[in-house]
Amino acid sequence: MMDTTLALLGIAGAMTVGAMSPGPSFVMVARTAVTSRADGLAAALGMGAGGLVFAIAALAGLQAAFLAVPALYLAIKGLGGAYLVYLGIRIWRGARQPLAVAQEAADPSQRPQGRGRRTFLLGLATQVSNPKTAVVYASIFAAFLPREVPLVLALAVPAVIFCIETGWYAIVALALSSAAPRSAYLRYKVWIDRSAGGVMGLLGLRLVWSAVHDGH
């Protein structure tokens, strides 16, 4: 029982540090939250769902699959990078549309139906599009999990991961959805969005380049 608790605490600590590290997921949630608290929380839930997917995949032996089929990792890395580039372009192109954002922030009742679901799916896609996250999960699990994983630990780890990912990004969403940050965002929206889009695009290009380079 003690070994199970220590393994769970070790995984939770390492994953908390990983979740708080800046990256595409943080950029996406932060940008969404300053436009709408509800959408920011939906995105946070998507991040948690993405973490749950990675946790289950890692427990199922994703790292072993990557090692056995290197081309699989390269393919996922390339596709994930391409998605981030696409997302960055979308953010950049939408930088000069502040009025709709301002209206949504001022009157949440006017949000289109299904907006929260789309934001949730966007958060989920952003999270799972980064194959390095899968490798980090698998590596952390390999470091802390015992050789034979008891059922209680196999059930507890995904639940803890979901809570960590969702909790951290919910904190980000709540912090950046108050009036002052939203006002600052609307004032400097063009530059903030273009910076966010540029970061997304560069991260995506880096992943694509890495996949091409590693494939040769």
Image (cartoon, rainbow, N blue to C red):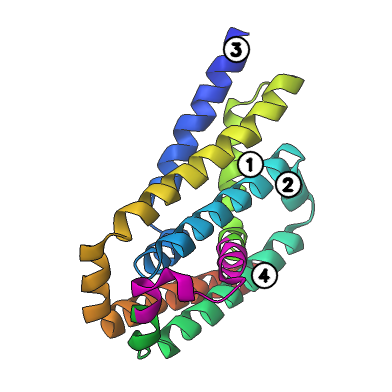
Disc 1 to disc 2, how far (Cα)?
Answer: 7 Å
Question: Mark 1 highlights which residue?
Answer: 138
Q: Is mark 3 in CB contact (under 8 Å) with mark 2?
A: no
Q: Residues within 10 Å of mark 2 (few under 14, many from 20)?
A: some
Q: Amino acid at mark 4?
A: Gly
Q: Is mark 1 in CB contact (under 8 Å) with mark 4?
A: no
> Which residue is depicted at the point 63% across and 41% down?
138
Q: Quadrant of residue 70?
A: bottom right
Out of 187 and 154, give the one closest to the viewer.
187
Image coordinates of residue 130 in percent, x first then y, are 57, 61
Q: Which quadrant holds the C terminus?
A: bottom right
Disc 2 to disc 4, how far (Cα)?
Answer: 19 Å
Image coordinates of residue 173 in percent, x first then y, are 39, 56
The residues colored magenta run 103-123
Q: Is mark 1 in CB contact (under 8 Å) with mark 2?
A: yes
Q: Earlier in the sequence, mark 2 or mark 4?
A: 2
Disc 3 to disc 2, how far (Cα)?
Answer: 23 Å
Q: Residues within 10 Å of mark 1 (few under 14, many from 20)?
A: many
> Which residue is depicted at the point 28% across and 59% down?
178
Q: Regarding mark 2 in the picture, which secondary structure is present there?
A: helix
The dominant secondary structure in magenta is: helix
Q: Earlier in the sequence, mark 3 or mark 4?
A: 3
Q: Quadrant of residue 144?
A: top right
Question: Mark 3 highlights which residue?
Answer: 3
Q: Regarding mark 1 in the picture, which secondary structure is present there?
A: helix
Q: Check the image and report above or below for 53 versus 79.
A: above
Question: Mark 4 highlights which residue?
Answer: 215
Disc 3 to disc 4, how far (Cα)?
Answer: 40 Å
Image coordinates of residue 10 in percent, x first then y, are 50, 26
Q: Amino acid at mark 2?
A: Leu
